[in-house]
Structures are given as C-alpha cells and as structure tokens.
Amino acid sequence: MHPIEHLRYVARVHGADPVEVALEAAEGLVHMVRDPAGAVVSARRMMEHHPENAPLWWLCAHAVTSMDPRTALRECARALRTDATSAVLQSELPADSTVCTVGWSGHVVDALVRRGDVRALVVDSLGEGQDALRVFARRGVEAELVAPEGIAAAVRSSDVTVVTSKSTSRDGVLCAGGALPLLALSRLFDKPSWLVSPVGVHLAPSMWRAMVDDFCDRPDPWAAGHDVLDWSHVTRVVDATGIVDVARHLSSVSCPEAPELLRRSAI
C-alpha cells in the first residue's frame, strides 16, 4: 500500500484501540521522512480525525520535531509496544479486591483480566462501561455496571479507585466523564485512588490545551463526556515504572511542542 493511502486509512478508521492507531500511523509516517512538509500535513490530518488519541498526537509531535524522524518514530513505536503500565497495575492491585473504575480503559481491563481475582465496579461513561463489561463477561471477571446514582456507594464499597488519563500535561489531566467525582469521593471516604497514565498520553501544554478545548470549550460542557482535573486531585500515578507520586511522574515524561500540528488543514 502507498504510504499516503496507508495514512488515509489510519485517518478514517474509528473505534480502534488508540495505541494500535498510533502504531499504524508510525508505519505510514516512516515512509514520509524524506518529505517533511508532506509528513506534517499527513500528521495534522490524522490528528484532526482522531481528536482524543493522545498516543497518536504524542507520536506525531516527536516525528515532526526530531532531526532524525525515522529513529524518533521507531523509538516511539517501541515505547508504545513495550509499555509496562498494565503489568504494573496488575501486580500492584490488592488480592481479592474490589476496584471502582470508569468507562473503558484497555490498560485497566487488561490488568483486571490477567489478575482474575479482582471484582470490578464500572461506572458508565458515554456507554463505554458496557464495552468493558462485555470483555469482563467473556473472560470470567466478576463485574457490575454502576449507574450515576450509585457512584458514591460504589466508591465506598471498593478497595481502590482506578481512573485512566486520556491525556496529560504539566497543566492538568483529561479523563473520561465521571472520573472527577470518583477521585473526589475516594478522598472523602479515605480510599486509595490511582491515576493510570500509560506511555504516550503526556502532551506538550499547547497540544493538551488544544485537545481539551476541542471537547470542553462549548456552551454545554456538561455534555462533553470528559472531565478536566488539576494534578491536585491526584495522589498516586500508575505508570510504566510503578506507583509513583505526581512530581516523580511528571519528571519522567515529556513531549515536544509542535505548533505546526495545531493549524487546521483544509479537509
């Protein structure tokens, strides 16, 4: 397949795992490195078609700002493929525990399925909770869907609350809608709460703000389906290195500024 057609396919695909989309983008962009202008336009258009795919945005930012984009793409793809965040979460969850989470997160679902001894209380968010329950049902994981009116009781009944970031920067965290009340209630009930931050979700501040504005800068922000958190709401972060505090996590992640990717294409 021609690289341009490959990238058009990546731009148009929807419903796929964000990491898989980013890896497919890397396969296409690596053949565009001799055409920097074309690579920038292609990356910009993929980002416009995938406005909440932080791993894709992170990969594109590295690709268009590096002096050696081919190597940058390969290193980003390797980091995404070998991300140990799910394995860390799997190993750190208490035995025979009840975990309260929200919406869909491939990393959380994978960790709970691999453990097998953990019960999940899944707060629905834009229907994504149903997707998680279907996977749990197929894999024999005990799980229940929690309606909004049951959030407080679910947090109180759980041993740990686990929320996954859709994207982060040093300025804040973008999560699925429902994450903020879960974290607030965890603090109120003195329950452990962890923010899962996989490889590739940390963006430069301008890119993170552009992503947040796409979803939340609207007359009815309550219908956006996303929560924006300050880091003050987060006590512990689960990343590829372990369970760490916020300062240590932020010192270990980075993403270059790429203002050329934030210009709108004529599509």
Image (cartoon, rainbow, N blue to C red):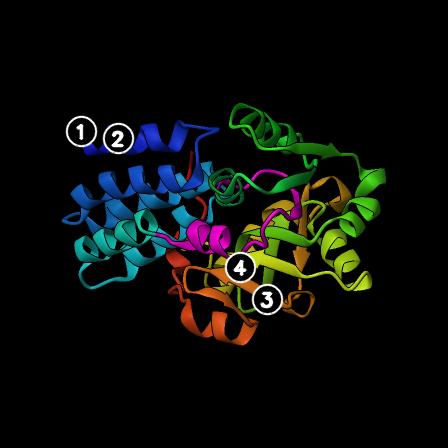
Q: Compute the Cα span from label 4 to label 1.
A: 33 Å
Instruction: From the image, state whether disc 3 or disc 1 is nearer to you.
Output: 3
Q: Amino acid at mark 3?
A: Arg
Write down the region rendered in magenta: 83-106
The label shown at residue 2 is 1
Reading the image, the residue beneath label 3 is 236
Q: Earlier in the sequence, mark 4 or mark 3?
A: 4
In this orientation, which residue lies closer to the viewer: 143 or 74?
Answer: 143
| Residue 88 can be seen in this image | yes
Q: Crowding near pointer 3: few (<14 within 10 Å), some, many (20+)?
A: many
Residue sitting at x 18%, y 29%: 2
Instruction: From the image, state whether disc 2 or disc 4 is nearer to you.
Output: 4
The label shown at residue 6 is 2
Residue sitting at x 25%, y 62%: 66
Residue 134: image x %, image y %?
58, 25
The kind of secondary structure element at disc 4 is strand
